[in-house]
Image: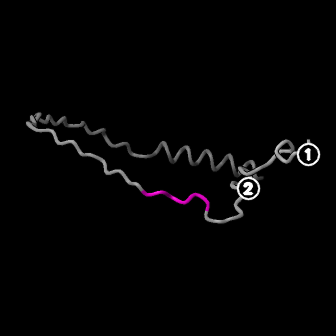
Amino acid sequence: MKTVITLLLIVLTGFAAQAQNRTPETKVVAVQLELVQVSTIQIAVAKKDTQVARLYRREGSRVKKALNFSTKHDQGVA
């Protein structure tokens, strides 16, 4: 029963899609713009920020712990 209802729904949707009135396509009107010559060119210089962002706010962050690992060779056990 589910299959029959699904197929009927698909067929009816297909018929409804074909029954739509198509509107004629409108042509695009091309607009031509003239070039304007600029006598001076202004260069914008970016302002350099000298602020430093704090990377790790918490003391026990996982990344900081992973970067501060030590090996057996460093501990003198090997």
Q: Amino acid at mark 2?
A: Lys
Mark count: 2
Q: Amino acid at mark 1?
A: Val
Q: Quadrant of residue 23?
A: top left
- Residue at far bottom of view: 58
Q: Which residue carries the number 2 mark?
A: 65
First to last magenta residue range? 51-56
Image quadrant for the C terminus? Answer: top right
32 or 37: which is nearer to us?
37
Q: Magenta span: helix, strand or loop, mainly? A: loop
Q: Which residue carries the number 1 mark?
A: 77
Left or right of 12? Residue 66 is right
Give the class, few, some or many, for how many residues have Cα within 10 Å of label 1's Cα (few <14, many ≥20).
Answer: few
Q: Quadrant of residue 39?
A: top left
Residue at image position (24%, 37%) is 28
Res 56 label: none
> Above or below — where is 36 with respect to 7?
above
> Above or below — where is 37 with respect to 20?
above
Left or right of 33? Residue 11 is right
Residue 64, percent from left and from top: 69, 55
**Marked residue nearer the N-terminal end (1 or 2):** 2
